[in-house]
Amino acid sequence: MPSVVVVMGVSGSGKSTVGRLLAQRLMVPFLEADDLHPAANRAKMAAGHPLDDEDRRPWLMSVADWIRRATHDGQGGVVACSALKHEYRDLFRQAGAGVWFLYLALDRATADRRVAGRMDHFMPARLLDSQYADLEPLRPDEPGLTVDATADPRTIVDEAVRTVREIG
Ligand SMILES: Nc1ncnc2c1ncn2[C@@H]1O[C@H](COP(=O)(O)OP(=O)(O)OP(=O)(O)O)[C@@H](O)[C@H]1O
Ligand SMILES: O=C(O)[C@H](O)[C@@H](O)[C@H](O)[C@H](O)CO
C-alpha cells in the first residue's frame, strides 16, 4: 500500500472532495494543503495573480514536511494538493517512501463551471488559465493513477482504493 496518497489536479478538479472521502475510506489522516498556504499566497491568488515557483516553494516545503512525518510515523495519510508540476511531485516523493498520486484529470469547460459556481473560495475563476498552463499531467514513470474527474466522487474513490490494494 502507498504510505501517502496525494490527490492532485487543477483548481476545481475535486481534490478536497475526493481526498476527504478517500481518507475516510482508508482511515488515515487528511491534509488540505490549501490550509498551509502562507497568507501572502492566499492574498496574491485572491487578488487575481497566479502563484509562481518561488511563491509555492515555502508552501510545498510545508506539505513535504507533513508527508515526511506521515510516512515516518507509519500512520500514512491523504493530501489534497494541486502538485501541478513534475518537480513539485518529485519533492513529495523525496519526502518519504511510498508516495502515490491520484490525478483528477478535468476538462477546462467543467473546471470553469465548477470554479465559477463557488462563491466561498479565495481562488478566482480567471486563475484557471494559469493552472492549466502550469499543469504537467502525471507521467507514466510517476507512481499513481489518472482518473476522469467528472465521474462521481465515490466511483473515483472506489477505483483508487481498488488500485492501491492491488499494488499493495
Ligand atoms: N466528481 C465531482 N463531480 C461533480 N462535482 C464535483 C466533483 N468533485 C468536486 N465537485 C464540485 O466541484 C467544486 C470543486 O471541488 P473541490 O473544492 O473539491 O475541488 P478542489 O480541486 O479541491 O479545488 P481547489 O483546489 O480550488 O480548492 C465543488 O463545488 C465540488 O462540490
Ligand atoms: O498551486 C497552486 O497554484 C495553488 O496551490 C492552487 O492550486 C490553489 O492552492 C488551489 O487550487 C486553490 O484552491
Image: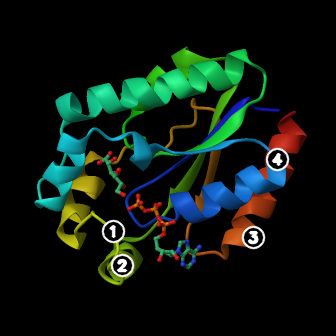
Q: What residue type is labelled 3?
A: Thr
- Marks 4 and 1 sit apart, C-alpha to C-alpha, by 27 Å
Q: Picture quarter containing residue 60?
A: top left
Residue 62 locus on image (x, y percent) = 42, 27
Determine whether, in the image, residue 107 is placed left or right of residue 97: left
Q: Which residue is drawn at 46% across and 43% down?
A: 33
Residue 27: give its label: 4
Tell me which residue sits at (17%, 52%) in the image.
43
Residue pointed to by mark 1: 121
Residues at circles 1 and 2 in contact by the CB criterion of under 8 Å: yes
Q: Residue 155 carries which label?
A: 3
Q: How many labels sit on residues?
A: 4
Q: Find residue 122 and report its horizontal and vertical position in percent.
A: 27, 63
How far is mark 3 from mark 2, CA to CA? 23 Å
Is 18 situated above or below 103? Answer: below
Where does label 2 land, which residue? Answer: 118
